[in-house]
Image (tube, rainbow, N blue to C red):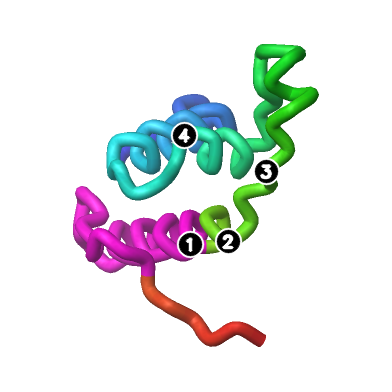
Amino acid sequence: MGFGKEDISAHGFRSTFSTMANESGLFAFDAVERALAHQDGSEVRRAYHRADYFEEGRRLMLWWADKIDAIRSGDALGSVETQPSEVEAE
């Protein structure tokens, strides 16, 4: 893609993940924020909102893995199905 080490940062990957996941419309904003280990800015909301979004987070990570696989296989936009691939629960 023409990027050097100085052009790439972990924060940039996190930003890309957040943007793509939120723009997909498939996942709750809170699930994306939880996946990034972000803390809610509201002290009151933190006190009362304790959902872990575990199942949605699992689907989100599967969707993201599918996106990355599509990009690696030559699809520059990472076009994938609207729903993540399913894996059997262990």
Which element is circle 3 on? loop
Residue that numbered label 4 is attached to:
29
Residue that numbered label 3 is attached to:
51
**What residue is drawn where x is 37% and y is 36%?**
22
Q: Earlier in the sequence, mark 4 or mark 3?
A: 4
Residue type pointed to by label 2: Glu
Q: Position of residue 51 (x, y in %)?
A: 67, 43
**What residue is drawn where x is 73% and y is 38%?**
50
Residue type pointed to by label 3: Ala
Q: Is residue 69 above or below residue 7?
A: below
Q: Which mark is residue 59?
A: 1
Q: Is there a contact, CB below 8 Å, between mark 4 and mark 3?
A: no
Q: Is residue 71 above or below residue 46?
A: below
Report crowding for label 2: few under 14, some 14 to 19, many 20 or more residues within 10 A (C-alpha). Answer: few
Q: Is residue 18 above or below residue 71?
A: above
- What whole-number distance in Å separates the C-alpha atoms at marks 4 and 1? 14 Å
Q: Is there a contact, CB below 8 Å, between mark 1 and mark 3?
A: no
Q: Nearer the viewer, mark 4 or mark 3?
A: 3
Q: Is there a contact, CB below 8 Å, between mark 2 and mark 1?
A: yes
- What whole-number distance in Å separates the C-alpha atoms at marks 2 and 3? 11 Å
Closer-to-camera residue (38/11): 38
Taking the image as shown, residue 11 lies to the left or right of residue 20, namely: right
Membership of 72 in magenta stretch: yes
Residue that numbered label 2 is attached to:
55
- What whole-number distance in Å separates the C-alpha atoms at marks 4 and 2? 14 Å
User: Where does the magenta region start and end?
Assistant: 59-84
